[in-house]
Amino acid sequence: MPSQPNPAQHAGEANERLVYVGDTAPVPISIEVIYYDEHTFEAQTLTALRECPYLHDGHTVTWVNVTGLSRVEVFEQLGQCFGLHPLVLEDMLDTNQRPKVEDYDDYLYMVVKHLEYDQETEAIGADQVSLVLGPQFVVSVQERPGDPFDAIRERLRTGKGRLRKLGADHLAHALLDAIVDSYFLFVERLGDQVDLLQEDLVSSPGPQKLRTLHTLKREMIFLRSAIWPLRELIGNLERWDTPLITQSTILYLRDVYDHTIQVIDALETLRDILSSMLDIYLSSISNRMNEIMKVLTIISTLFIPLTFMVGIYGMNFHFMPELQWRWSYPILWGIMLSVVVGMLSYFRRKKWL
């Protein structure tokens, strides 16, 4: 894997040149441009921006979706076309941003995290999605292909619902809503894993279960860092007095805010369960050790009187009358077996077995 730029090495360079800062190698860039209004819809896919894709006709909404961060010149052209601040372009190319929203008067800039599940590593990853909401345009930028926006594209293509009748702010709301709704799948998957682990910790605790518990706790921390800031982000969109968001869209944003609270509440519940599961693991290990010690103690207790009797008759004194008896050997065996049976009966009566 090629080495990635270090953010510390490029501190102070935001206004001079743009650089990609991320944890993975950037994928080839793809640009999807969609124009729509209540009666028309047009979509095209580009590999480069030769001219500004923004239509300034006052009623057509322009949605530019950029996938991949490999070519910095594309973002420079986006900045020139939509009048984006260099700090916005820098944040788009820096995939380590915290979810946030910033007001630049003429447009709003938002950063959210789109979660993905890696089937090979069975781990949850996150792609940064940047959204720019302008008067009649929305620009979305994502690291890699694969997003939860297919349903939105289909609604725009077919004209179902009210999406094509409303402005760019409603499109931005739909994109945010799709990302938040996708979080429920990951919370549900994490909840299923927690339930299975909770049963295993009680029935068969072991080092592997403890490692799984620590893995789930790391995933929980990762999810909280991606989802928790959304509460503040959407709350700010509701409260800010900006002409870019209409009153009708604020009502829809409240619904997204409620979904965010539901996800956060579910995460907090799972977090509490995971915190208590360590106590369950330690209790299970302690109970298992107690059972083992009880068995060993019973075995040792049974052999104490037997060892005493065998020790007496193993001293090899010359004058031991029992050694000359014909039935001394089977009698000794009978006594030892009777002692064992008697002690087991006593333990069972005391409910120690």
Image (cartoon, rainbow, N blue to C red):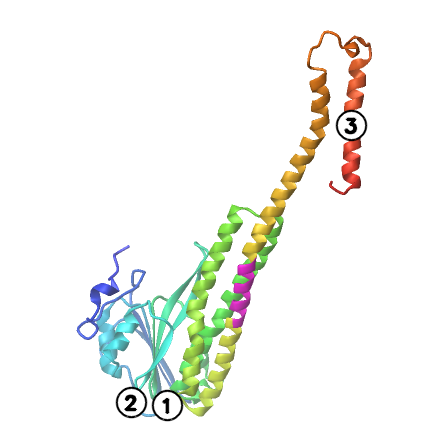
- The residue under label 3 is which amino acid type? Val
Q: Element type at marker 3?
A: helix
Q: Mark 1 or 3, which is nearer the eye?
A: 3
Residue 326 in sight here: yes
Residue at image mark 1: 242
- The residue under label 2 is which amino acid type? His
Q: Mark 2 or 3, which is nearer the eye?
A: 3
Q: Position of residue 2 (x, y in %)?
A: 26, 56
Residue at image mark 3: 339
Q: Which residues are magenta?
A: 265-276
Asked whether residue 268 is drawn in magenta, I would say yes
Q: Of label 2 and label 3, which has the lower sequence position? A: 2
Image quadrant holding the C terminus, namely top right
Mark 2 Cα shell of 10 Å, populated few (<14), some (14-19), many (≥20): few
Residue 157 in sight here: no
Total marks placed? 3
Q: Label 1 to label 3, Cα distance in Å?
A: 90 Å
In which quadrant of the rendered view does residue 147 lie?
bottom left
Q: Main secondary structure of the magenta part?
A: helix
Res 56 label? 2
Q: Residue at x 41, y 79 (%)?
A: 233
